[in-house]
Image: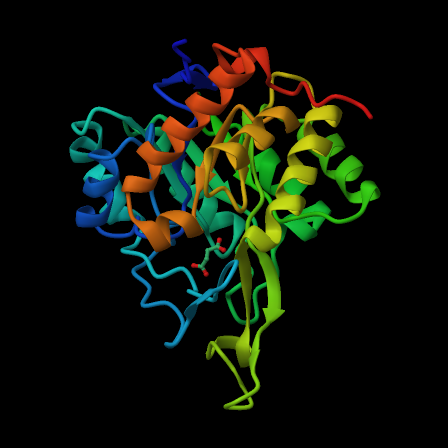
């Protein structure tokens, strides 16, 4: 049985449900080219800022048995470098998703305006990086989210989405959904890493990463139940016109299928891509197809959002 994993985010056709997440291995042209040559259905850039950033001091990433912890601090080339790269990225034949992460509304207005005048397909505004010392995650400041969305969603016709932090209380899901409904936000990406977690090495008696006293974003299997819950909650609270890209702990076809049941329109892969490299996209795609075929599903819509009540 053949299974069709093609999907569409905000009118942009994607050959499959799987793409890279803004995060690992998507900062330089060389890294983005590897994604372009893989089975990832889109090329998602590292979140960019106004200027080049080295990022946080090393060590700032560590593998964990069930995922990873990182506090990269947005190392990136600066938005103008990605803007210049757009024609080359588009020439790789895939949808191009630029991720932007300004440190103020003014930064984000400048960057969104610039990419609105480019050939990128989708703009993902990252409101949820937990790793910049002294900067709170915008996604947890509902007033600031509303002000930012009012400013950013009037800058052009290219679809805008936002990358959200993980929420843990129903009141927060509801409050955020009410804000999103006021603006033409086309998609949300959820979730970013769980920020400000601490892993201690009992041998060295130190944290295992350096920035922020060892506090960093937790990724991978640890956060899959939180990612699933965020996708599910927002799918139930938002109209279908706001599409959802799921992220968090997807490392095989079954994980990807669970996000589909929760209501994801597409998923992004971060830690698994970091650990395994770009071959993960084809492997997970094949596993998802095999699992869906076994269940008699031939396309995403057969199972999308169809979590069965107990
Ligand atoms: C980082 O560069 O620190 C991670 C990006 C993010 O969490 O949004």
- Please identify the quadrant where the N terminus is shown: top left
Identity of the residue furthest to the front in this view: 294
Q: Position of residue 238 (x, y in %)?
A: 70, 24
Front residue of this view, candidates 141 and 257: 257
Q: Residue at x 30, y 54 (%)?
A: 78
**238 sits left or right of 268 in the view:** right
Q: Is residue 293 above or below residue 271?
A: above
Among the 4 quarters of the image, the one containing residue 54: bottom left
Q: Nearer the viewer, residue 101 or 150?
A: 101
Residue 106 in percent (x, y) is at: 48, 49
Picture residue at 32% right of the left edge, 57% below the top: 76
Q: Position of residue 293 (x, y in %)?
A: 47, 15
The answer to which image quadrant residue 88 occupies is top left
In this view, the residue in front, 310 or 241, is 310
Residue 278 appears in the rendering: yes
Q: Is residue 64 above or below residue 86?
A: below
Is residue 158 in view from this perspective?
A: no
Give x and y (percent) for residue 118.
28, 30
Say which quarter of the image contains residue 136: bottom right
Please name the residue shown 60% across and 23% down the image: 242
User: For the point 38% across and 22% down, which residue is it?
Assistant: 16
- Say above or below: 212 vs 23: below
Name the side, left or right, on which 155 lies relative to 261. left
């Amino acid at each position: 049985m053949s299974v069709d994993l093609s999907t569409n985010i905000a009118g942009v056709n994607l050959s499959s449900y799987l793409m890279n997440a803004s995060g690992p291995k998507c900062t330089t042209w060389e890294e983005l080219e590897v994604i372009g040559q893989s089975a990832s259905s889109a090329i998602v850039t590292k979140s960019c800022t106004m200027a080049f950033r080295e990022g946080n001091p090393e060590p700032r990433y560590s593998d964990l048995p069930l995922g990873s912890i990182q506090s990269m601090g947005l190392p990136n080339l600066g938005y103008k470098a990605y803007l210049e790269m757009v024609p080359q990225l588009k020439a790789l034949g895939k949808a191009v998703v630029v991720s932007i992460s300004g440190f103020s509304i003014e930064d984000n207005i400048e960057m969104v305006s610039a990419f609105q005048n480019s050939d990128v397909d989708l703009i993902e505004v990252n409101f949820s990086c937990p790793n910049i010392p002294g900067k709170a995650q915008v996604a947890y400041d509902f007033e600031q989210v509303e002000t930012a969305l009012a400013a950013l969603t009037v800058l052009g016709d290219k679809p805008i989405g936002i990358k959200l932090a993980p929420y843990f209380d129903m009141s927060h899901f509801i409050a955020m959904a009410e804000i999103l409904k006021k603006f033409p936000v086309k998609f949300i990406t959820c979730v970013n890493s769980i920020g400000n977690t601490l892993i201690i090495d009992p041998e060295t008696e130190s944290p295992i990463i350096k920035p922020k006293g060892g506090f960093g974003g937790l990724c991978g299997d640890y956060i899959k139940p939180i990612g699933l819950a965020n996708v599910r909650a927002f799918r139930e609270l938002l109209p279908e016109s706001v599409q959802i890209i799921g992220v968090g702990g997807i490392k095989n076809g079954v994980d990807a299928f669970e996000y589909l049941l929760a209501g994801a329109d597409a998923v992004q892969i971060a830690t698994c891509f970091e650990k395994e490299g770009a071959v993960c996209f084809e492997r997970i795609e094949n596993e998802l197809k095999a699992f869906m075929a076994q269940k008699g599903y031939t396309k995403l819509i057969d199972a999308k959002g169809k979590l069965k009540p107990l």
